[in-house]
Image (cartoon, helix red, strand yellow):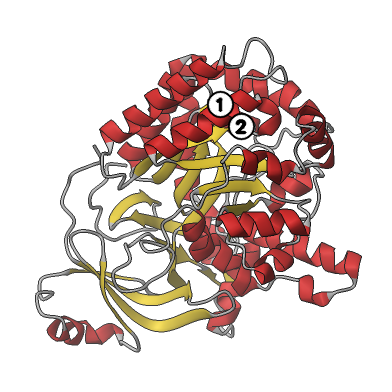
Amino acid sequence: MAASASISKTIYVGPFVHSTSLTDLEIEEKGAIGVDENGVIAFVERNVSQAGIEDVKSRNPGWQDAQVIKLEGNGFFFPGFIDTHTHASQHPNTGLFGKTTLLDWLQTYTFPMESSLSSVPTAQRIYQSFVSRTLSHGTTTCAYYATIHVPATNLLADICLKRGQRALVGRVCMNSDLSPEYYRDESVETSVRNSQASIDYIRSIDPKGEIVKPIVTPRFAPSCTSDCLSAISKLAQETNSHIQTHISENKGEIALVQELFPKSKSYTDVYDTHDLLTPKTILAHAVHLSPEERQTILARKSKISHCPASNTAITSGCAPIRTMLNEGLTIGLGTDISGGFHPSILENVRQAVWVSRHLALQTGDDATKLSTEEALYLATRGGAAVVGLEEQVGGFDVEKEWDAQMIHLGSVDEEGSSDAVVHEGPVDVFGWESWPDKVEKWVYSGDDRNTIAVWVRGRLVHKTALYSGPKDATTL
């Protein structure tokens, strides 16, 4: 089970920033957020002076002895990021997308790397590093693809649970001839049996699914035979599991799907006719969906993971996110390591904005562009809805759980000296900036050096030397 050390009632004092809707970002300069022993937000107060904490305690019975974490200077609290699609097993290949197309890239880089995780020590090294890396970037929830190996997949779940990072962990299903003989499921029965084994294990270590949950993971349609897709769909239904896969990432891939499934009307129809489109399904990429396909996905209440950095790196295309939002689809952001070149959702916030602007340049339609506020929504509340946690995380609302980052921005003194240089942070604040300016600087210039502490369900799961608050439930 997860670390069982108790959490004290804590009042987080200082500026906080979060999305209140797709287009609205609340920036409260003088906030006070009370988080109870279960990591749940009990109250949110605004316009509270640093000296007024005793008044806050007196207005909230039972909080007189609460510990206080104050954030001063150019910093703010922000909800934890949610990565709705990434491959933990591909972490060592980050940045190695080369000059290949998607399908060649799988054979050249991906399958050899993933197959090496049949070794548990190798998996331990890679997964431990990647979970630490994603936490350092403020990612409090992650939908992970593992590999076909049951022990390594279970190990990833163990690591997430121990570190306290929320995770959906999936053993990858792939039994078709597209996969090399050295790295594929031997049969449909093997695929189902091994997936069931990982589901059972993950639920045994976290029965309530408070931190880790299983997710059924047919890699993508070309990796699975029709019988396998049907069997995996049945397994997801019988175990009430989430499902994750890829869809319409690349035009060559779409052509291959049509060749392999000639009776299907579209890529989406392949999944729909195999009962894989459910309200608990995450579809990564969705770059080239037709209007009819998008309507089917909307009708089935399945969700979309937008992976802008990966789509650009692999030259898959620019997903029409504005169109999909206007149509009512639920969308979050994914890093898609290692097709994506960076494990940071903040980087993908930027990339989502850039991709939308490239589309606007192509079409001449400025309405295509995403705003900063919209991209931050996709990174938090949008992602929470994609992974089925919209009632629990994504914003600083009473009764949501405290999944949060403490952001620190550097300041420049009158001589031009910068504490950001001393602390290696990339964002300089000169003092004239408004709070919206500071947030924009962080979004477009910041990185993990600005994330000095991270909490999940009220437990500290990552900190840097700049964090001076109490070190509570997690051993780091």
Q: Quadrant of the C terminus?
A: top left
Asked if the residue at tag 2 contacts the one at tag 1, i.e. Cβ–Cβ closer than 8 Å, the answer is yes
Residue 67 or residue 100, whichever sits in front: 100
Residue 7 or residue 196, whichever sits in front: 196
* Other residues around mark 1 within 10 Å, as few (<14) / some (14–19) / many (≥20): many
Q: Mark 2 — residue?
A: 219
Between the C-alphas of marks 1 and 2, the distance is 6 Å
* Other residues around mark 2 within 10 Å, as few (<14) / some (14–19) / many (≥20): many
Q: Which residue corresponds to the image point at 35% horizontal and 80% vertical from the top-left?
A: 31
Q: Report helix, strand or loop for mark 2.
A: loop
What residue type is disc 2 on? Arg
Q: Is residue 320 above or below residue 342?
A: below
Q: Is residue 26 visible?
A: yes
Q: Is residue 74 visible?
A: no
Q: Which mark is residue 242?
A: none
Q: Quadrant of the N terminus?
A: top left
Q: Within the image, what quadrant is residue 7 found in?
A: bottom left
Q: Which residue corresponds to the image point at 72% horizontal and 68% vertical from the top-left?
A: 322
Q: Which mark is residue 173?
A: 1
Q: Position of residue 281 (x, y in %)?
A: 53, 47
What residue type is disc 1 on? Cys
Q: Which residue corresponds to the image point at 48% horizontal and 80% vertical from the top-left?
A: 26
